Image (cartoon, rainbow, N blue to C red):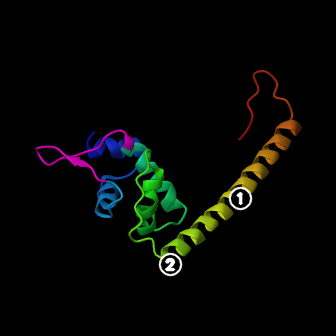
Amino acid sequence: MRIGELARLTGVSRRLLRYYEEQGLIVPDRSTNGYRTYDERYVDRVKQIRGLLAAGLPTRIIKQILPCLDKPRSIHFPDATPEMLALLTTERDKLSDRIEMLTRNRNAMTEYLTEVEQHRAPIAPGQLRST
């Protein structure tokens, strides 16, 4: 697929996809006319990148951990310094904390919705509920 199709399927602009390419996060093939071409795996890859960015990870760290998302995995360790490993550990712990908070918030919303639904007055046939 071409860049426009990938943008449409992922909801990410073409400009941002080109930025991901500049950062080494995605590496499209090039057709004979020079157009970028992407296979289907890039749809999930771009969504994973978006999720990691939304979690607060910078692109330089995302580039390090992207091989862990591949099957089969192709992890390389040439620049896995103690500082990088400490940073990744910190970021992982932040993600765990955020997941815990999101889970608590989701559970609270579910409890609220359940209570509201249980205590709502029934709607008579033909009656519209105001919103």
**Front-most of residues 72 and 108:** 72
Residue type for callout 2: Glu
Q: Position of residue 24 (x, y in %)?
A: 32, 61
Q: Quadrant of the C terminus?
A: top right
Q: Residue furthest toward the top?
A: 125
Instruction: Using the image, tell me which numbered label, if any, was put on residue 8.
Output: none
- Residue 100 - label: 1
Q: Which residues are magenta?
A: 27-41
Residue ID at (76%, 26%): 127
* 1 vs 69: above or below: above
- Residue wearing tag 2: 83
- At mark 2, the secondary structure is helix
Q: Earlier in the sequence, mark 1 or mark 2?
A: 2
Q: Is residue 129 left or right of residue 58?
A: right
Name of the residue lying farthest toward the bottom: 83
Whether the magenta-drawn stretch holds residue 29 is answered as: yes
Q: Residue at x 73, y 38 (%)?
A: 130
Residue 64 lies in quadrant: bottom left
Foreground residue among 47 and 125: 47
Q: Categorize mark 2 by other alpha carbons within 10 Å: few (<14), some (14-19), many (20+).
A: few
Identify the residue shown where x is 71% and y is 60%.
101
**Which quarter of the figure has residue 102?**
bottom right
